[in-house]
Image: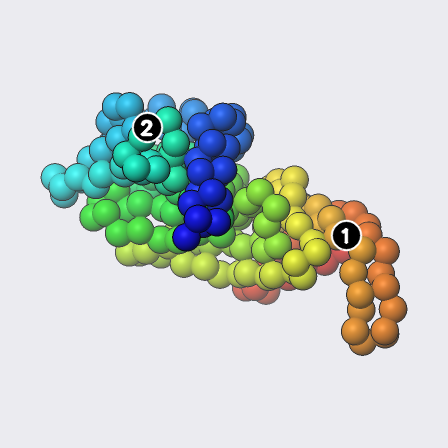
Amino acid sequence: MRIYGILVMFFALYLNADMSYFERDVNTTQLEQCKAFFTQKNDLTIVHLQNGQTLALQDEYVNSDPKFKTLLYTLKGCFAKEKYLIYSDFMPDMESYYAIDLRDGKETPLSGMPYLSPSRTFFVTEAEASHRISVYTFGDERILKVFSHRYPDQCVTQNTVWLDDQTIRFELECDEMFDTDTNTTKAGAKESLKLIYKDGKWEITQP
């Protein structure tokens, strides 16, 4: 219990000290377009749904001390046309992303911060030190994941951008790792890859 308490305090201090980490991927332009759907005061965010109900996102602390947060909510962006508000919650071990349906309050977990395709048909997600790349689309009533690929723990995806409606470019950076198939150690490397939509499905290809 003492060790856990020390760890919680350490992460709480981190949350309190470096708020810029949580603002790194905030889309202020999108949030401005959706400002009628939320109210923020101190450490509480109230989300106003189209059905007249509200949702509360309240930060949490160690022993109710506002200096030491153990759970932090951050509004990240908003899809005004599709009526989804994006937020993350950060606890001592991870940051998780969600999309709130502003019509009824239903939440969809996401693999990271979403970035829309030019036509707004799809969006791709990216997160800090993520091993996964995922693509979603908008269904009639909910968000649908249409592609997801997870790389080994030694690899992270980064610098993800849309080149056009059917092409995504991203970087894959891997540390040195042991290949059990060949019984050899593979050197670390960084490569540029593409995720292409063709014949109704997404495929990862070399550039």
- Image spot of residue 15 (x, y percent): 46, 32
- Image spot of residue 102 (x, y percent): 25, 42
Residue density around tag 2, few if under 14, some if 14–19, many if 20 or more, within 10 Å: some
Question: Where does label 2 land, which residue?
Answer: 66
Q: Which mark is residue 33?
A: none
Q: Determine the image quadrant of residue 152.
A: bottom right
Name the residue at the left extreme: 52
Q: Is residue 43 above or below residue 183?
A: above
Residue at image location 53% in from the left, 61% down from the top: 147
Q: Is residue 66 above or below residue 92?
A: above
- Image spot of residue 163 (x, y percent): 64, 41
Amino acid carrying label 1: it is: Asp
Disc 2, SS: strand
Asked whether the beta carbons under mark 1 and mark 2 sit within 8 Å of each other, the answer is no
- Image spot of residue 111 (x, y percent): 49, 52
Name the residue nearer the viewer: 96 or 196. Answer: 96
Residue at image location 33% in from the left, 36% down from the top: 61
Residue density around tag 1, few if under 14, some if 14–19, many if 20 or more, within 10 Å: some
Name the residue at the bottom extreme: 181
Please identify, in this view, whether the residue under mark 1 or under mark 2 is nearer the observer.
Answer: 2
Q: Determine the image quadrant of residue 87.
A: top left
Name the residue nearer the viewer: 11 or 199. Answer: 11
> Which comes sooner in the sequence, label 1 or label 2?
2
Asked whether, in this view, residue 191 is left or right of residue 70, the answer is: right
Residue at image location 81% in from the left, 50% down from the top: 189
Asked whether, in this view, residue 161 is left or right of residue 16, the answer is: right
Disc 1, SS: loop
Question: Alpha-carbon distance for marks 1 and 2?
Answer: 38 Å
Q: Taking the image as drawn, is residue 20 in sight?
A: yes
Name the residue at the front extreme: 2
Q: Which mark is residue 175?
A: 1
Q: Is residue 145 above or below residue 180?
A: above
